[in-house]
Image (spheres, grey):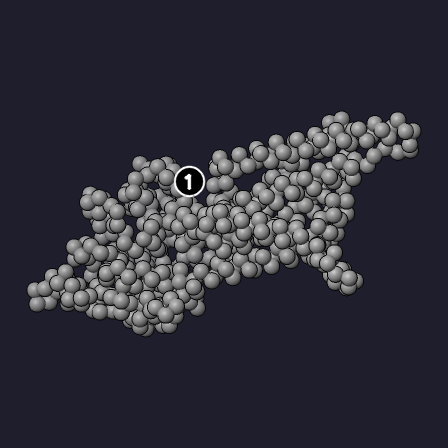
Amino acid sequence: MMSPILAILKKDLTALFTNSMFYLLTGICCCLWGLFFSFELYAFVQKSYQLSTQVQQGGLNIHQHLVSSYIVIVHYILVFIIAALSIRFFAEEKKLNTFPVLLTSPITSWQIVFAKWLVGASLIFFLLFISAIFPLSLLTFMSLPIKLFLYSYFGVFVVLCVYMSAGLLASSLTESLIVCVVLSLMFNICLLLMGVGRELTDSLIFQELFGFLAIDQHFATFRKGIFSFSSIVYLLSLSGLFGLMTERVVEYHRWR
Amino acid sequence: MIEVKSLSKRFGKHWAVKNTTWSVEDNRLLGLLGPNGAGKSTTMKIMTGLLCSSEGQVLIDGYDILTHPIEAKRRIGYLPETPPLYEELKVVDFFDFVCGIKSVDSSQRSRQIDQAIEKMSLQEVAFKPIRVLSKGFKQRVGIGQTLIGEPSILILDEPSVGLDPHQVVELRNIIKGLKKDHVIVLSTHVLSEVEQICDDVVILDKGEVKIQGTLQELKTGGRSLEDVFIEVTR
């Protein structure tokens, strides 16, 4: 049961980690995160200094005023990076004609899709780990609310899994690498804008419905360091829905 | 054993395969012949579960490829027209990956990989990335991956396309060597190749079986296979 999934996971991760393009993208991410983290840190230090001169009680909350805003930047950059890397899931397999190896092996479409999902999740985990180095470096000279930090990072991981699953679907729909990236970006932008529906209706019920469906609402909860079980269930269900659609598309290849 | 029963495949309004019925017994090598667009590759894709049939069924050692795909696929090794190779992987790593997706027991893996490397004479390139190999070696790696999982049936779609004459002879000898342990279905345009290695022949044209039988049966009356092919596909 697990052997084919692990084999695909190992093969895809090996291929990814030996690909120079992946290191180039990771390098670009690191530069951007480093740059934005420096800006955020500078702004945080400025605000803290102003507060200390105004003889106010208590300092600035580091999670709220530094880590949380940094996570938003990490999230937005990764939405684009995931769209670019989604070509590796299926589009490249189809383009390089390696897809028949998977489709003619004694494995189910579910196992193929789940293995690819795990590849994407591992990739997100790796990139988030790299991004966490910047805020964690602060630990050398000050304390961080680690619990809030971990909850926020876990939340952004789950949110990014939804975007990655949308990329999985986009990748299964085409063998053109460019079309795959464009489709993946379109799906991700639609997911980002789901909350706009809230503003377009006067009905309280629909406002609440759109509020719950909007990923940004759940993301905002996680950013505050709040562990929301219902948000996790909703986001994993959404990711599962994309997985289900991907499985149907993979199966459709046989029936076309 | 492979049994193809009343098999049909339609793409829109076009029938790529029309009501074909034939079978191959154990330890036989069947040549699937036909002009371009005859339905050979489509038939092979249906036999391996890559495509679903519109009508009819394919039984692999008694298992229907549509209703029992996992059991049927366990018994098949398939080489498509273009070998499906992960070019960034080394040959041994690629074979190890195929062991994984075919759920080969970990205690059997190294033996099966060594066997595939030995049978395909890949010793000198086993630790090289596939992308640096010549076309002939890539084709051998492609056939090597079909042997992983020790399937009883090999389905090879035009394995000698694009090879030079030396490589074609080498490949022919390799396929001959595989015949004693497997049922082999081979599609090719090279009639001399069929005459040298095949036991049975099915000639398809416009999706239909035009003639089938053993090589000897087809060549009765002093006719060559080429004469028969030209006559039935005219």
Picture coordinates of residue A102, whole percent (x, y): 44, 54
Picture coordinates of residue A119, whole percent (x, y): 54, 47
Outermost residue, left side: B222
Query: Would residue B20 be visible to someone looking at this image?
Result: yes
Q: Residue at x 52, y 59 (%)?
A: A247
Residue B149 located left or right of residue A75: left
In which quarter of the view is residue B60 placed? bottom left
Picture coordinates of residue A185, whole percent (x, y): 57, 49
Element class at badge 1: loop
Residue A36 located left or right of residue A246: right
Q: Residue at x 47, y 62 (%)?
A: A252
Q: Residue at x 78, y 29 (%)?
A: A45
Query: Would residue B22 be visible to someone looking at this image?
Result: no
The answer for which chain carries disc 1 is B
Q: Amino acid at mark 1?
A: Glu
In which quarter of the view is residue A57 placed? top right
Q: Residue at x 87, y 28 (%)?
A: A52
- Classed neighbour count for the residue bearing mark 1: other residues with Cα under 10 Å, few (<14), some (14–19), many (≥20): some
Residue A52 located left or right of residue A13: right
Relative to B103, does residue B64 appear above or below in the rendering? below
Relative to A155, does residue B15 appear above or below in the rendering? below
Identify the residue under disc 1: B88
In the picture, which quadrant includes the C terminus of chain A?
bottom left
Picture coordinates of residue B29, whole percent (x, y): 24, 59
- Count of marks, rendered view: 1
Relative to B5, does residue B226 appear above or below in the rendering? above
